[in-house]
Image (cartoon, rainbow, N blue to C red):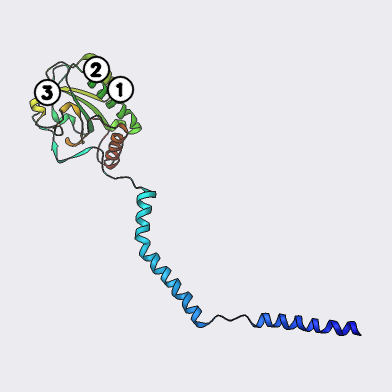
């Protein structure tokens, strides 16, 4: 009896404690809900205000978009090839300027003796054309000899070995009426890009970056795919 009497109060106390714990939990008040909603709205406002800053940061430091400008200098206005440009081939035969139309031209200017700098330029000219792959037949290499010295035979043969090459001779004074170097540079320092209509339209920087110049040529060939021709 005494054992049963002593255990009952303990059970009652435990039930009361359990019941007290459950029913003493406070329910969220209306003020608490308003505070939480206010904080959420404040966070959203701050996020909206900071969005332009975050976007700028990501763009500049993470995405780092590449520039979309051309590497070569655009000639404005374009200069059409003079109809009376006195061109002569290496055999001494007169050549009509109109015969250069119908194809993209990558033009190099150098003396007939073709020193080391000239050889390097003509080599790069060949490499750039070959790098165009299946589109290379839409680009001709042109070497304009402007100093009255006959073009060195070995240089001519090396240039023509890769195909689609034209070597022409003309007086420097006549050439200066069509092509023009950048300030402080010489005619020999640049490549000149001529479109299929015979317009000189881009001047390549001296000592060009081959990869960047090739990208210029790729862009031009893609843009003109519907109106230029293969071969002249």
Q: Earlier in the sequence, mark 1 or mark 3?
A: 1
Residue for badge 1? 162
Residue drawn at point x = 67 percent, y = 80 percent: 22
Give the camera-side residue of 147 and 170.
Answer: 147
Q: Quadrant of the N terminus?
A: bottom right
Query: Which of the two discs, 2 and 1, sits closer to the camera?
Result: 2
Say which quarter of the image contains residue 202. Answer: top left
Q: Position of residue 226 (x, y in %)?
A: 27, 42
Residue drawn at point x = 8 percent, y = 27 percent: 174
Q: Are marks 1 and 3 in contact (CB under 8 Å)?
A: no
Q: Position of residue 3 (x, y in %)?
A: 89, 82
Image height check: is 45 above or below 101? below
Residue drawn at point x = 20 percent, y = 38 percent: 73
Q: Position of residue 144 (x, y in %)?
A: 17, 24
Residue that extends furthest to the top in the rendered view of this protein: 153
Image height check: is 205 above or below 162? below
Say which quarter of the image contains residue 20. Answer: bottom right
Q: Quadrant of the C terminus?
A: top left
Residue for badge 2? 155
Residue for badge 3? 170
Q: Secondary structure at mark 3?
A: loop
* CA distance separating discs 2 and 3: 17 Å
Decide: few, some or many residues near mark 3? Use Cα within 10 Å; few <14, some 14-19, many ≥20.
Answer: some
Q: Secondary structure at mark 2?
A: helix
Give the camera-side residue of 104 and 11.
Answer: 11
């Amino acid at each position: 009896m005494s054992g049963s009497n002593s255990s009952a109060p303990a059970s009652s106390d435990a039930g009361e404690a359990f019941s007290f714990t459950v029913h003493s939990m406070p329910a969220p008040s209306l003020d608490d809900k308003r505070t939480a909603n206010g904080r959420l709205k404040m966070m959203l406002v701050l996020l909206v205000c900071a969005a332009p800053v975050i976007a700028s940061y990501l763009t500049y430091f993470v995405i780092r978009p590449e520039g979309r400008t051309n590497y070569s200098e655009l000639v404005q206005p374009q200069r059409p090839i003079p109809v009376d440009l006195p061109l002569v081939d290496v055999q001494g035969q007169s050549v009509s300027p109109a015969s250069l139309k119908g194809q993209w031209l990558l033009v190099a200017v150098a003396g007939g003796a073709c020193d080391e700098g000239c050889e390097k330029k003509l080599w790069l000219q060949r490499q750039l054309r070959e790098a165009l792959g299946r589109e290379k037949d839409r680009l001709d290499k042109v070497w304009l000899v402007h100093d009255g010295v006959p073009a060195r035979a070995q240089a001519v043969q090396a240039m023509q070995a890769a195909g689609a090459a034209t070597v022409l001779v003309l007086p420097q004074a006549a050439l200066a009426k069509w092509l023009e170097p950048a300030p402080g540079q010489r005619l020999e320092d640049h490549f000149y890009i001529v479109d299929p209509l015979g317009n000189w339209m881009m001047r390549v920087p001296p000592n060009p970056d081959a990869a960047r110049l090739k990208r210029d040529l790729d862009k031009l060939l893609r843009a003109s795919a519907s109106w230029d021709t293969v071969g002249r």
